[in-house]
Image: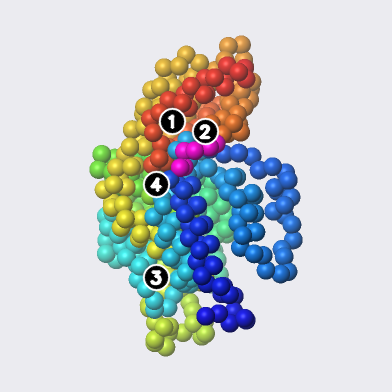
Amino acid sequence: MSDMGSLDPQDWRAFRAFAHELLDAMLDRQQNADVGPVWRPVPEAVKKRLAEPPPQAPTPLKELRRELDACVLPYAVGNTHPRFWGWVHGSGTPGGALAEMVAATLNANCGGRDHGAIYLERAVVGWARDWFGLPGSANGLLVSGASIANLIGLAVARYRHGGERRVREDGPTGARLTVYASEHAHACIAKALETLGLGRAALRSVPVRADFAMDLAALAERIASDRTAGLRPIAVVATAGAVNTGAFDDIERIADLCARECLWLHVDGAFGALTRLAPELGELTRGVERADSLAFDFHKWLHVPYDAGCILVRDGELLPATFGGRPDYLANVGGLSGGEPWPADLGLELSRGNRALKVWWTIKEQGVRRLGEAIARNCAQAQRLAAALAAEPRIVVAAPVPLNIVCCRYVGEGLDAEALDALNAAIAVSLQERGVAVVSTTRIDERLCLRACITNHRTRDADLDLLVREIVAAGERLI
């Protein structure tokens, strides 16, 4: 029964019929994810239509559905398609979509209080803590993604090594605080230091070796030099799966150095940390159990719907010490206001969606072993793709393939480096605009390369074979 002043449907029977029809249509999209182009550009007419002012009166559901079909669904990112290998996108699951529907109907604010979603998040954080071998005293929370998780981890490092409570009250004082990371570290590390008031200059970029892992001798030298210059090193960021190449820093040896130098060890494992779930890849994350903080994403290689990242901190008490503090109107007087500790006291957000339900659902539905097998399969596919590309006379594999990322460069006769850069960019755009496949581009040794990142459980070997053929064909056509 609905009241005329309510925003609920006036005709629940009709609404249910519409909802079932829409759900079937969305499941059809996932069941047939390989049908149609991977991506298509959004026409100017559609952009103009979507920019129209909002209506003052209600829009009938059938009209909304027509607008959805015309303006949104045909122009998706494409990461549910088996030939999407751009950037580091998870490809989602039908079960995850169901979990999102349930979470939306519950509509819980997971900043705190005593309700089921809070305990669900604690369970998920506990599972992750155990995966990475962190102690029972570790704690964490779910966030929008690794960018915010890295920010939180470095905020805790700043609190712990930058003066603790004085940092919260006065900001950093005294010698400039410095943080060390590979020159291939993700750009969000620099943004985090800017946001924390330390400035981009606080990030000390460390050269990499031929395999694109951090040069530890150079790291030690940079720390010693900065101490001599009167700076105050506080943390090292180890990368577990560099976004350009998939390279892993040597976490174990970095942990040894951090122990000697009394520095915080933060691991950015946005996607690579989850190789921990694949036994044959476990050696890559050796030493992560010694991290003081760890950032990673569920929405990449676990295919949880966006967004769902995680931050774990070895000493869980440091999270409320860094972020805690609640006004009177949020006081715990028992009842619904209980549920301590509140996630709001462990991070930045008071208003938080129910990210845990879709993570919990995905792990429960698929099982840890199956999720790990999908990760290992993508890494094996990357090796297969690299071999097939290397067999082509016009293609050079531009970097080692330690994980799931393959970088290559089409080389044409008589073209200088700048012309080859433009050619490879044109190949990537051609593949995308024709809807054949989505690869991204990056620079390896200052040369623009095609980059295929396989975090896609739907990818088949035949899709990779098609990619090789299409790169060759596009190069020949565009040269």
Of badges 2 and 3, the one in the foreground is: 2
Which secondary structure class fits the magenta region best?
Answer: loop
Up-down relation of residue 254 to residue 170 (above or below): above
The disc, 1 or 2, on the residue closer to the chain's N-terminal end is 2
Place of residue 422 in the rendered image (x, y in percent of width and height, measured from the top left):
63, 25
- Helix, strand or loop for disc 3: helix
- At a point 31% along the width and 52% down the height, the residue shown is 366
Labelled pair 4, 1 in contact (Cβ < 8 Å): no
- Helix, strand or loop for disc 4: loop
Query: How far is mark 1 from mark 3, CA to CA?
Result: 39 Å
- Helix, strand or loop for disc 2: loop
Q: Magenta span covers which residues?
A: 32-37
Query: How far is mark 3 from mark 4, CA to CA?
Result: 23 Å
Taking the magenta stretch, the answer to whether it contains residue 279 is no
Q: What residue type is labelled 2?
A: Ala
Query: What residue sits right under mark 3 in the picture?
Result: 117
Query: What residue sits right under mark 1 in the picture?
Result: 463
Crowd around label 2: few <14 · some 14–19 · many ≥20 (10 Å) = many
Place of residue 135 in the rendered image (x, y in percent of width and height, measured from the top left):
27, 61
Residue sitting farthest toward the top = 414
**Residue 437, label in figure:** 2
- At a point 46% along the width and 42% down the height, the residue shown is 33
Q: Which amino acid does label 4 sit on?
A: Trp
Crowd around label 1: few <14 · some 14–19 · many ≥20 (10 Å) = some
- At a point 62% along the width and 81% down the height, the residue shown is 4
Query: What residue sits right under mark 4 in the picture?
Result: 301
- Helix, strand or loop for disc 1: helix
Labelled pair 1, 2 in contact (Cβ < 8 Å): yes
In depth, the one of 32 and 111 nearer the eye is 32
Q: What residue type is labelled 1?
A: Asp
